[in-house]
Image: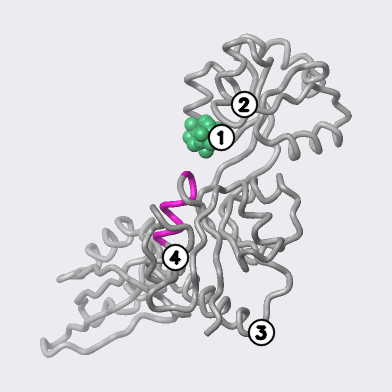
Amino acid sequence: MKMLRIAVQAKGRLFEETMTMLQESSIKVESGKRTLLVPAKNFPVEILYLRDDDIPQAVASGIADVGIVGENEFEEREENAVILKRLDFSKCRLSLAIPEVRMPEYIAQGLTWFNGKKIATSYPGILGRFLKKNNITADIHVITGSVEIAPGIGLADCIFDIVSSGSTLVSNNLKEVEVVMHSEAVLIGNSNLSEEKKNILNEMLFRFDSYKNAEGKKYVVLNIPNDKIAAASELLPGMKAPTVTKLETDGWSSLASVLEEKHFWEIIGKLKQLGAEGILVMPIEKMIL
Ligand code: PRP
Ligand code: ZN
């Protein structure tokens, strides 16, 4: 039996959320603390745990069939693989940041400020292409970790690095001045997958979607006076229309629908005003549209 081999980051940014997504898609794998290659227990995939820098090449060369990696890593390596799906987690941006004290200068000069500067980064490829496009000549200084401390210790004038919450920049007195790219986790694939592997991939993508669709949604059941069903239905769009069931108690019905968590309290408040009672809220595990 053929297996689809998925390259996954062994630790770091994407690791936790990747494992959660697999788990919620009912693909059972143990995290590869000791072994590099771990077959799933109940689905024809095997997980190859790698450093994130190595994932694009592993997929391009066919060592892995697909991989889950930050778009920034994929962009950086320019390997011959394709993005099959944007996964909507681990969102961040790649930005240029400069010491706060240089801000007045920067405001006056704009991007040309970077001419002749020494920029520390772990992403020389993306940065180099950006500078070239903007006709800026700067000295790219490659370091693999703790990029943010480089200006403070005199190793560089400024940095080009991942920004997520922005707190690393703040604690190093750096100011983000230019967002070069937005990034998120992506599923990349080798361009020559066999039919058999494509079928496994499609089943896996279908499961990823069912999990993503259910994320942030709740199933709500409540009792409502019959003359308020129409008004309540308007508040509960659901997947199609809410399900209405007559109750034994005269003049009352039960309504069931799907609610988005972010509008949850607002809608529940309005439903109570309409006279809704016995409101039950349940988690949704999967949603197949
Ligand atoms: C990135 C980046 C910053 C930090 C930014 O490092 O290099 O240090 O995240 O995040 P923030 O804006 O939320 O503070 P990462 O955690 O990926 O680890 P690494 O630099 O050690 O590879
Ligand atoms: Zn870092």
Q: Earlier in the sequence, mark 3 or mark 2?
A: 2
Point 61% across, 79% down: residue: 197
Identify the residue under disc 2: 176
Distance, label 1 to label 2, CA atoms, is 9 Å
Point 77% across, 17% down: residue: 117
Residues at discs 3 and 4 in contact (Cβ within 8 Å): no
Q: Earlier in the sequence, mark 4 or mark 1?
A: 4
Image depth: mark 4 or mark 1 in front: 4
Membership of 18 in magenta stretch: yes
Identify the residue under disc 1: 163
Distance, label 3 to label 2, CA atoms, is 46 Å
Residues at discs 1 and 2 in contact (Cβ within 8 Å): yes
Main secondary-structure element of the magenta-colored stretch:
helix
Distance, label 4 to label 1, CA atoms, is 32 Å
Answer yes or no: disc 1 within 8 Å of ligand 1: yes
Q: Earlier in the sequence, mark 1 or mark 2?
A: 1
- For mark 1, give the secondary structure: strand
Horizontal side of 229 relative to 184 (left or right) equals: left
- For mark 3, give the secondary structure: helix
> At label 1, which amino acid type do we have?
Val
Give the residue furthest to the front. Answer: 35
Residues at discs 1 and 3 in contact (Cβ within 8 Å): no
Identify the residue under disc 4: 38
- Which contiguous range is marked in magenta? 12-20
Image depth: mark 1 or mark 3 in front: 3
Task: Find residue 185 and report its horizontal and vertical position in percent.
Answer: 56, 54
Distance, label 3 to label 4, CA atoms, is 23 Å
Task: Find residue 208 and report its horizontal and vertical position in percent.
Answer: 48, 70
